């Protein structure tokens, strides 16, 4: 039984480590955005919807706005116009990369369905368990992520 528990513990540690495996490091560009090979930010989700609808919504390809080197998509023209008028208000922090991974000094993709708004700012995470870790000390994790984000963008 002890061997089983020990093996299970090592598997858990391995899975947790894999969750925060280093992704390709960003180029030294202070305006980096999490955009796919199609150059669409945050997997095509509408960043304004998190604030106005209280939930993630897919954006439409024909309702887009270019900002910070990427194409941002929106559910409707009103959201696009709100973003265009104040992109820093609506864009996710850390270019839309996983906030918890950044708190740990890593770059990690996100699941647009896993998000948190803290002090009027949008933070995205990789998974629900990772979001739970982030929320356990949101302000502390944000501070660490801000410090690490600066390191990636010298």
Image (spheres, grey):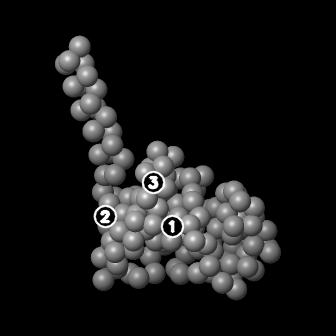
Task: Please state which of residues 98 and 27 is positioned toward the viewer in this rendering.
Answer: 98
Task: Please state which of residues 43 and 134 is positioned toward the viewer in this rendering.
Answer: 134
Between marks 3 and 1, how big is the CA–CA gap?
20 Å
Residue under label 3, please give it: 136
Where is the N terminus found, in terms of image quarters? top left
Residue under label 1, please give it: 96
Sequence-first tag of 1 and 2: 1
Number of other residues with Cα within 10 Å of mark 1, as a class: few under 14, some 14 to 19, many 20 or more: many
Which residue lies at the image location 34% right of the left edge and 52% below the top edge?
20
Dot in front, 3 or 1: 3
Examine the rendering and report whether any part of residue 60 can be seen.
no
How many callouts does the rendering have?
A: 3
Q: Given the current orientation, which residue lies at the most extreme bottom position?
A: 85
Task: Please state which of residues 127 and 31 is positioned toward the viewer in this rendering.
Answer: 127
Query: How far across and how far down the image is residue 34, in percent?
Result: 48, 67
Query: How far across and how far down the image is residue 154, in percent?
Result: 30, 83
Sequence-first tag of 3 and 1: 1
Dot in front, 3 or 2: 3
Residue under label 2, please give it: 105
Which residue lies at the image location 38% right of the left edge and 81% below the top edge?
29
Pointer 3 and pointer 1: residues touching (CB < 8 Å)? Answer: no
Which residue lies at the image location 35% right of the left edge and 68% below the top edge?
144
* Element at label 1: helix
Number of other residues with Cα within 10 Å of mark 3, as a class: few under 14, some 14 to 19, many 20 or more: few
Quadrant assignment, res 12: top left
């Amino acid at each position: 039984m002890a061997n089983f528990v020990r093996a299970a513990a090592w598997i858990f540690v391995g899975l947790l480590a894999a969750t925060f495996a280093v992704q390709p490091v960003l180029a030294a560009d202070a305006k980096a955005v999490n955009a796919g090979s199609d150059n669409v930010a945050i997997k095509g989700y509408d960043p304004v919807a998190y604030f106005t609808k209280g939930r993630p919504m897919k954006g439409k390809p024909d309702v887009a706005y270019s900002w910070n080197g990427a194409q941002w998509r929106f559910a409707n023209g009103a959201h696009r116009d709100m973003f265009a008028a104040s992109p820093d208000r609506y864009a996710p922090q850390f270019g839309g990369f996983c906030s918890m991974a950044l708190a740990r000094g890593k770059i990690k993709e996100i699941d647009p369905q896993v998000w948190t708004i803290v002090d009027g700012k949008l933070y995205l995470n990789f998974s629900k368990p990772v979001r739970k870790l982030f929320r356990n000390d949101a302000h502390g994790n944000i501070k660490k992520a801000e410090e690490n984000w600066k390191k990636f963008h010298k």
